[in-house]
């Protein structure tokens, strides 16, 4: 099994979406351009969601226009529905990937997307079809893989159903989001064992928030089960505005150190990431 791990940097999106103040286009572009020079091949840079719900992502089109597009790097955007797809259309043909997202729990689905899980799949299906027609790569997310802020613990089978629901729409990598950062290795292992019944390890990614301080242990559990794709945010930025008590994606620099110690390669320059982490922290004020 390969020793190469791909880091999916989510700082400019998941990291900044929860900030109290709006981060300027210039600051976002500076952060993205720095990250683009680090050897990262995947960076999530914004969202085409309602500006009323997530004002911090309203300047996504300007960010996309002004940021560098570094060869070999793919830039991700969240797109929940056709209204979001319409916003993305001018960027078709660029090095962009569209990400659709659902929850494994009904409570978070209502809070985050204002609809049921089934309805969210209905809304994202035409987005996936449009992306396929336009040759735009698609990624999926499932949130609340161990716990939901509204419904409590999530059953592993609910996560497996959500992953299967996304992959019934189209083949796609699905990132498994520990939205609250409450996951612990035993429960993450049980969840992965259920999910691996419906999707192979090379089609899954781990997306751990580090609120409970268990993200690295959870990554190790996922590595042991063959996952080689992990989401993280430079400087440990982040959280989700619709998941109360969910600060902090696991920091990219921490994940890189962990993977290095375990003998995995990422191709990412840790010095550049350290610089980007300082920039990210500075722009938060
Ligand atoms: P809604 O209010 O149910 O939507 O929101 P609607 O279809 O009823 O439309 C209401 C208004 O919103 C209309 O405008 C629409 O045009 C507009 P009006 O006529 O009132 O002026 N609208 C939009 N505007 C811009 N872009 C759009 C869009 N859609 C409708 N795409 C909606 C539904 C999905 C839009 C809303 O719930 C929303 O934007 N939610 C935000 C979701 C979000 O970004 N959450 C954070 C990201 S997910 C996350 O962080 C988890 C993850 O990291 C993994 C993990 O950690 O678990 C991925
Ligand atoms: Mg997240």
Image: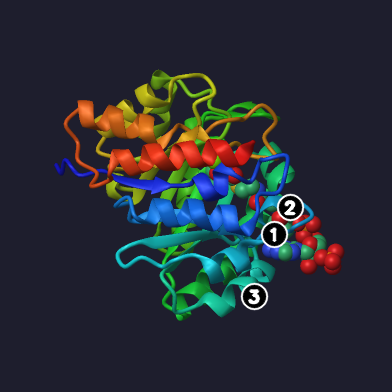
The residue beneath circle 3 is: 86
**Nearer the N terminus, badge 1 or badge 3?**
1
The residue beneath circle 1 is: 58
Q: Are marks 2 and 1 in contact (CB under 8 Å)?
A: yes
Instruction: Tell me the residue at 53%/27% (across/down).
Output: 181
Classify mark 2: helix, strand or loop.
helix
User: In the picture provided, is 151 more to the left or to the right than 205?
Assistant: right
Along the line of sight, the residue nearer the viewer: 70 or 144: 70
Instruction: Tell me the residue at 20%/44% (across/down).
Output: 4
Q: Are marks 3 and 2 in contact (CB under 8 Å)?
A: no
Is the residue marked 3 within 8 Å of ligand 1, measured from its CB?
Answer: no
Of the 4 image quadrants, the one containing the C terminus is top right
**Nearer the N terminus, badge 3 or badge 2?**
2
Classify mark 1: helix, strand or loop.
loop
Of the numbered discs in the image, which one, if any, rests on residue 245? Answer: none
The answer to whether residue 112 is above or below residue 72 is above
Q: Position of residue 102 (x, y in %)?
A: 58, 49
């Amino acid at each position: 099994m390969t020793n190469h791990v791909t880091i999916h940097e989510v700082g400019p999106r998941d990291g900044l979406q929860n900030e109290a103040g709006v981060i300027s286009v210039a600051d976002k572009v500076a952060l993205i351009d720095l990250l683009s020079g680090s050897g990262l091949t995947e960076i999530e840079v914004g969202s085409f969601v309602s500006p009323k719900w997530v004002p911090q992502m309203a300047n996504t089109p300007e960010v996309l226009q002004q940021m560098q597009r570094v060869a070999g790097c793919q830039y991700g955007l969240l797109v929940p529905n056709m209204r979001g797809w319409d916003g993305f259309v001018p960027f078709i043909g660029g090095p962009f990937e569209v990400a659709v997202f659902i929850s494994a729990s009904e409570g978070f689905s209502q809070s985050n997307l204002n609809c049921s899980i089934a309805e969210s799949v209905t809304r994202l299906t035409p987005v996936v079809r449009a992306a396929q027609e336009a040759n735009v790569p698609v990624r999926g997310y499932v949130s609340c893989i161990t716990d939901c802020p509204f419904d409590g613990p999530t059953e592993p089978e609910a996560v497996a159903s959500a992953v299967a629901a996304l992959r019934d729409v189209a083949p796609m990598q699905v990132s498994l989001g520990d939205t609250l950062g409450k996951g612990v290795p035993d429960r993450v292992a049980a969840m992965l064992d259920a999910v691996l019944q419906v999707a192979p390890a090379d089609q899954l990614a781990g997306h751990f928030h580090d609120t409970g301080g268990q993200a690295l242990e959870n990554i190790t559990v996922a590595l042991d089960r063959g996952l080689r794709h992990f989401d993280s945010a430079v400087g440990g930025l982040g959280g989700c505005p619709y998941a109360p008590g969910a600060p902090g994606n696991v920091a990219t620099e921490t994940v890189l150190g962990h993977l290095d110690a375990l003998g995995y390669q990422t191709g990412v320059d840790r010095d550049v990431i350290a610089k980007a982490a300082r920039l990210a922290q500075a722009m938060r004020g």
